Structures are given as structure tokens and as C-alpha cells.
Amino acid sequence: MRTVESRLAARNPYFAVFARIGAPRRPVLTAVVFVVTALTGVVQLLVPALYDHVRRDAAAIDAGEWWRLGTGMFFQDGWALGLVFNLAVLALFGFAAERVFGRWRWLVLYFGCGLFGQTMSYLWLNPVGAGNSMCVAGLLGALTTAVLLAPSRCGVPVEARLRLGALVIPALAIVGTLLHDNHGLPTLLGMALGFLLLPRPASAEERV
């Protein structure tokens, strides 16, 4: 794990910041959710008819199938390509977020933002679909806040260009929402939760 972490930190300055904020830990939650999401994705590819019974579907939800807001976070409307891409970003941002925020906060960020995104998609933005990308968008939002707060809350210096780059994320989230993309709102919620949940150095021993 340290080898992977050191390589990411060497290649990407943002991951170097995450490495200094968080406490070293194995990305157990990221791995578990990755495996479960991968397995459900493979089952979907093997049994395509299953997708219609688990996707987010406003008409079905209105008829009482509220559980689709949950299953919609594990299946993919992008099918094979969507599955590969979403697993890749889950591995990348999930690893970083689990280090920075710890495990129980990771659960709140991932599933809280994912459920919020599914709900807002059902109510407004995109009534039919599925995917874990909105969950990952929440992690990305939280990591954006971590970069912005690192100097003041964690005592970790961050170059001005990196903080400026991080501000691109909320700007894109707002524009995307205005264009009816359903990833913007969970990203913004992730930023807000990141502000509330980012551990201070004094509580580093609690990041489990």
C-alpha cells in the first residue's frame, strides 16, 4: 500500500497533500465496495434483463419501489464502459478519501452523497438511470474541501495553484447542475460534509 501511495504522491501533488493530511491505513472500505460494485456490474452484464428491475426509475419508485434509490448505486447505466470507468475512479478517490477522512466518515460521504444524488435525480435531474458515480462525486467534493482547508485546519501547506485548481470542482458542479447533470449536487454536498467531517490533527487517533 505504501508503494502505491508513494507513487501517487510523487505523480500528483494533490495526492501528496492527502498523504500528509490523513493517517496511514489499508483502504478496506474502498476494497469492499469496489468488489461488491464489480460483482453486481458483472451480474448485470451476464443478465441484462436484471437492470430494468434495479435501476433508478421514477415511475417504479412512485409505484412504491423505493429500494431502487439504493440499488441504483450498485448497477451501471453505462454498462461495461461505465462499470470500468466508475470502478477506476472509485479506487482512486476512494483510497484517498479513506486515508483523509477515516472509515466511518467515508461511509457517510460515499453513501450519503450517493443517496442524495439518486434522490435528486429521481425528483428533478435524471429520473431514469443507475451508477455509483454520484457516490464518487461526493468523495471528490470532500477531498476538494480537504485541499482548501489543509493549511488552516491541518497545518499542511498547499500551494496557491493547487487551491486554485481545487476551486474548479465547485464551479464545474454548479455549471453541471444548471445543465441538468446529476453529479454536481452530490459533489457540492460532499464539499459541505467534508467541511464538517475533516478531522483535525488532534483527533488523528480517532480516524478509524
Image: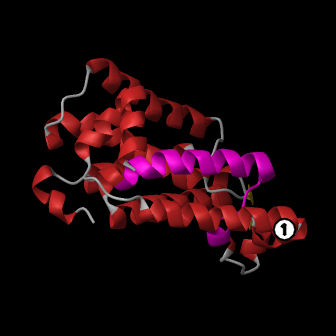
Could you tell me residue 126's position as x and y percent? 71, 52
Kindly indicate the quadrant of the structure image that contains residue 4.
top left
Could you tell me residue 192's position as x and y percent? 35, 49
Q: Main secondary structure of the magenta part?
A: helix
Q: Is residue 128 left or right of residue 136?
A: right
Whether 86 is among the magenta residues is yes
The residues colored magenta run 69-98
- State whether residue 183 is above or below residue 27: above
Q: Is residue 187 left or right of residue 197?
A: right
Q: Is residue 192 left or right of residue 56?
A: left
* CA neighbours of label 1 inside 10 A, class few (<14), some (14 to 19), many (20+): few
Whether 83 is among the magenta residues is yes
Q: Secondary structure at mark 1?
A: helix
Q: Residue at x 28, y 49 (%)?
A: 195
Q: Residue at x 57, y 60 (%)?
A: 34
Task: Pick whichever, 43 or 67, lies toward us.
Answer: 43
Q: Is residue 167 visible?
A: no
| Quadrant, the C terminus | bottom left
Extreme bottom residue here?
64
Q: What residue type is disc 1 on?
A: Asp
Kindly indicate the quadrant of the structure image that contains residue 163.
top left
Kindly indicate the quadrant of the structure image that contains residue 135.
bottom right
Color encoding of the figure: secondary structure
Extreme top residue here?
161
Q: Is residue 177 visible?
A: yes
- Report the residue marked by disc 1: 52
- State whether residue 74 is above or below residue 194: below
Q: Residue at x 36, y 27 (%)?
A: 13
